[in-house]
Every structure is written in C-alpha cells, then in structure tokens.
Amino acid sequence: MRRKFPFVPILIFALIFLLINGYALNALATIVAAPLLVWFWVLPIVLLISFAYGVARLRVDGQSPFFKISAHALLVYFVSLLVFVLAEVITDIYRLGLAGINYIAKGNFTYPERPIIGVYIGILIASLIIIAFVYGILKGKYAYRVIKHTLYFDDLPDAFEGFKLVQISDVHAGSLNNPKAVQKGIDLINRQQADLFVFTGDLVNNKAEEVKPYIAHFSQIKAPFGQFSVLGNHDYGDYVKWESDAAKRENLQQLKKYHAEIGFRLLLDEHVNLEKNGQKITLVGIENWGLGFGERGDLAKALQGTTKDEFKILLSHDPSHWEAQVKNHPSKIHLTLAGHTHGMQFGIEAFGLKWSPVQFRYKHWAGVKKENDRFLNVNRGFGFIGFSGRVGIWPEITVIELKKKK
C-alpha cells in the first residue's frame, strides 16, 4: 500500500506560514528596503518546496539528509518567525491602545506609526531563537545533564538506606550520529557509581539493527545490583512498514537479544527481587503501556507473587500509565520510573520557569511528582528523535537516592 502524500495538511500549513510571513514583512518594511524584502518571500517559499519534496520522497529515500536539512531549516525559520510576529502583535496592540485613547480624548482615530524599537526587539529575540536552535542541533543534543533526586519513604527497608540508582530512557540509537559524544554520556553514567542501573525504553527508533553500532558503548554500563530495562513504544517497530508480520516479530526478538548482549536484563511483565542484608526491594518491569501508544503491558501479571505493601519500584516507559493504573493501584508501588516525553526536546527550564509544548499532552512530563504517597520520575531522555537537537530540555541522566523518612 502506497503512503499518500499529505497534500492537504501541507497546503494548510503553507498558507498559514505565508500569511504569518506576510505580517512579519509588513513590520520589517519600516526598516528594510523593498528590494531586500523580496528575499524574505523567496526564502520561505524555497523552504516549503524543499520540505514538500522531501516528504514526497520519504517512502523511497526515508529520512535522507536532504529531508532532515529541509525540515530543520523550515522549523528554525518558522519558530523564529513566530517569535518575531508575537513581538509585533504586542506592538500593534500597544498602537491600537494609543489610538483608542486618542479617539476618546480628541474624537479622532489616528493609528500611530509602528515604533522602530519594537521591530528591533522582535529581530533580537528571533535571532536568539535561531542561535539557540543552531546550538541545540550542533551541541545541545549531546549536552548530557546529571539530575539528582533524594526521595524519602516511611517503609524503605533499612538495608537500602542510601541506595542509589541511575536511570536513562529513550536512547533512540537510530538517531545517534556521534559515538564520541555518546561515550561521554556513558562515562558520565558510570561516574555516578550507582547501586542499580535502569533503562526505561525506546532503545531504537524502529529497527533492532540501529543499536548495533552502540552495543560496545552501552555494554560498559555496570552496577552491583545489575542493569535492567523495559521496552518503549518505538521498540516494537510499529512506525515502519514490514514485508511481513513475521519480519516484524523477528525484529523484536532480535532487539531483545541485543538487550541481553548489552547486559540489560529485560523485564517483560515480571519482577525480580533485589536483596541486601536479608532484606529486599522488588523491581517490576512491564511492556509498553501508554494512552495512544499501545497498551501492551500487564501490570497484574508483573505483580503476581508480590504483596501489596512490600517496597516496589516500577519501570514503565510511558507516564500516562502511572496516571491511569499505578498511582491508585491497590498494591502500593512506591516509585515509578518512566520516560517517553523527551520534554519534547524543546522548552524552558530556567529561573524557576518550567515549560514545554509537551505539557499540553502530558500532565507530568519531566522530573519527580508525588501523589497518594507514591513517586513518579519522568526522565527527559538520553537521545532524540524527529528534531535532531535539543533546545532548553537537555538529555538527562537521572540519579535517585532512596532514604528512610525519620
């Protein structure tokens, strides 16, 4: 079955894009000569045509370098354009307010000229956005951050006081293109000297073979209590066309073998006990369960043989699972570790601000949340997909220390 070219969505986007561009050029006309303004029409039209051609060739070429360059160039231009236009809309609201005041005071409606300072402010902000995106594409996607949390529990077994675990998620090996940078991330993981390592899904984008070049890297990760993993929605190969169902199943089986080759103990709707000084905590792992992304995991099966009050840590790729089943489950799950959101690889986390467009899809999209005396941590992801970069939401290595509440 041939994949249809998305003509209508691209046409709608192009019309909206060009209308916004026209509004921006109306503002720029106050400081840019008319002959130069023509190029501000030529550039977006060329970007749109290039992107549309890349989309049309996706079925044949896949995500070729041409498609990636055209898509990223269009994204950077469009976002910077939106920011510039926002500044000019604020300026126009100000002008309209002045005109209204003048009308009330003098009885005549005169729309003030556009203040040039507003145009320059818009250009400055748009330029900063472009610089941020260029940094995010060239450097930000490998700018690993270690984020540490100390969590306190009333019923943590005494033997596990100070127990430290490291979590990463969403490697997306098919997107990685800098083995040296990835190695720096691996070294950073090992420097944390954690008791336990966990990986919460999406080792690849679509196909098992994507992780082969990085097996030697990830197999360096070691922890005294082991390395454990679960599957994410991308690991099942649902987003590419396979020659047969058998080929798709074989791909998943091969991916499971690669988990083992790396040294990850893959948990498939099951649990293991981690024992220390005669006491234990239970590590539970389920297959991917996410609203809109496949509800494969079977939590009841994974919990079979456990008691409702024993100390449990759950690995579940999608945080929507915590909202839907975990936080109010009769069997108390003390800590759930998830990923999946990537923080949309774009947002702001600075000066007390925390914002990303992904918050319109996920109630809790990054960091630690506590509800009903249970914790959820959402890792921002180790890798990237779609947009080959990160802006403001950096790749994360999570370190969590377990403490007993006194």
Image (cartoon, grey):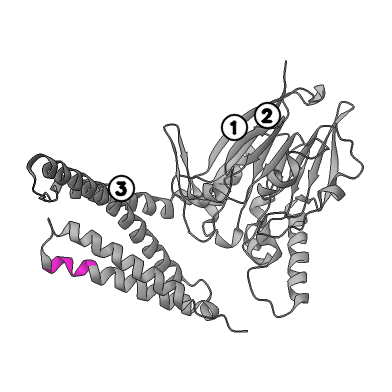
Disc with the residue nearer the chain's start (3 vs 2):
3
In the picture as drawn, the residue positioned furthest to the bottom comes out as 1
Instruction: Work out whether residue 260 or residue 303 is closer to the camera in this orientation and state it.
Output: 303
Asked if labels 2 and 3 touch by Cβ distance under 8 angstroms, the answer is no
Q: Identity of the amino acid at label 3?
A: Leu
Identify the element where label 1 is drawn. strand
Asked if labels 1 and 2 touch by Cβ distance under 8 angstroms, the answer is yes
In the picture as drawn, the residue positioned furthest to the top comes out as 406
Q: Identity of the amino acid at label 2?
A: Glu
Residue under numbered circle 2: 401
Query: Residue, x 28% and y 52% (percent of image)?
Result: 84
Residue under numbered circle 1: 148
Instruction: Work out whether residue 158 or residue 208 is closer to the camera in this orientation and state it.
Output: 158
- Where residue 373 sits, quadrant-wise, is top right
Residue under numbered circle 3: 128
Query: Residue, x 58% and y 48% (percent of image)?
Result: 362
Disc with the residue nearer the chain's start (2 vs 1):
1
- Where residue 283 sits, quadrant-wise, is top right
Position above or below: 68 against 200 = below
Q: Magenta residues: mostly which secondary structure?
A: helix
The boundaries of the magenta stretch are 35-40
